[in-house]
Image (cartoon, helix red, strand yellow):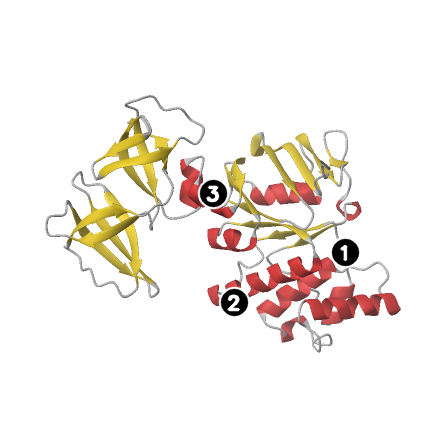
Amino acid sequence: MVLTVPLIQCVDLTKRFNGEAVVDQVSLSLQSGEILSILGPSGCGKTTTLRLIAGFEGVDEGEIQIRGRVVSSIETQVPPERRNVGMVIQEYALFPHLRVAQNILFGLRDRSGGGANHRLAELLELVSLTGLEHRYPHELSGGQQQRVALARTLAPRPVTVLLDEPFSNLDSTMRADLRLEVENILRESGTAAIFVTHDREEAFAIADRVAVMRQGRVDQIDTPEVLYHNPTTRFVAGISGISNFLSGITRGERVDTEIGQFSWENNGLNFPQGTPVDLLVRLDDFQLVPDPEGKSEVVSREFRGDEVILSASLPSGEILRCRRHHYSTIPIGTRVSMFPTRPTPFVVFRKPSA
């Protein structure tokens, strides 16, 4: 079996500001052609991690390797311009006095001659800007400006592209469209990328794997599907999707709850018989059925256009939120019974101490 060296390997990265670790023992890797997203709230250390990889900051502990070569450690700090890593930031940083073609070619050392012109034509076609090369940035839409910034970053054929919240300045519709365009550009060019965002939908839509960060540390790295269905911490469960928690008690391979007994995943943990736990319940894990004898009652209804979210109060007062089709007509006050629809065992977490 041939083992490939990761394109980028980060091992136990730590970075401190004023004595406080904003990046704390972070380890992650990026494979050739892969898109990795770093997902987390503001202040969790995701942008600092990106800056460490780019070489804009030096590590206090740990090391970074690019194609097996150490570029950051206590002893080594290769400058950004010698790492062959491209970076796209929120503000695009286009030169307002330069035309599209000049902005794109700025990233090339040799900006003249047939080679540069050929590369420019390739990039204009790649980012769908052919015919706009003579325009100035202010003559472009926000999405077109973002594509110019990406083309400029791709011009020197970097080892990888780092994207720091690149869509945050766009409205929701344009953000979704441009996200798909950027992913297609990266896939078509075969460029590996690390994409930083606080938006779960963006991270899940574009990435092969997602690293969830919290308070400077990585809680879990996995595919979007695994993060959603099998989170290893409550924080990952919450950031990966809307979460309900249903109280229960372990009984062997089952958990007793007030609405029934269900099989559960241990997530590598061994909970003894009789352990108080919380079942992670997603919006689609239960079906609500009107039932005059039902133990639960619909207490709120959110119509979202393409779906309806119903909140049902259980006998204990706990609330579970469930998704229904947009044409659902179950009104508030309806008595309901709840039936599980989850095809796999529920994920459980030990109940927090009071």
Residue matched to label 1 = 157
Residue matched to label 2 = 174
Image x and y of residue 18, in percent: 58, 32
Task: Determine the secondary structure under disc 3.
Answer: helix
Query: In whole angstroms, how far apart are the C-alphas of marks 3 and 1?
Result: 32 Å
Query: In whole angstroms, how far apart are the C-alphas of marks 3 and 2?
Result: 26 Å
Image x and y of residue 93, in percent: 66, 60
Name the residue nearer the viewer: 217 or 137.
217
**Is 245 situated left or right of 41 in this image?**
left
Residue matched to label 3 = 227
Q: Residue furthest right?
A: 113
Residue 352 vertical position relative to residue 36 in the rendered view, above or below: above
Sort mark 3 into few (<14), some (14-19) or many (20+) by Cα contacts within 10 Å: many
Q: Residue furthest left?
A: 293
Q: Residue at x 24, y 44 (%)?
A: 319
Name the mark nearer the viewer: 3 or 2: 3
Task: Determine the secondary structure under disc 2.
Answer: helix
The amino acid marked with disc number 1 is Arg
Q: Is residue 25 visible?
A: yes
The amino acid marked with disc number 3 is Leu
Quadrant in the picture for the C terminus: top left
Q: Earlier in the sequence, mark 3 or mark 2?
A: 2
**Disc 3 vs disc 1: Cβ atoms closer than 8 Å?**
no
Quadrant of the image occupied by residue 74: top right
Residue 62 vertical position relative to residue 227 in the rendered view, above or below: above
**Is 81 situated left or right of 114 in this image?**
left
Query: In whole angstroms, how far apart are the C-alphas of marks 2 and 1?
Result: 27 Å
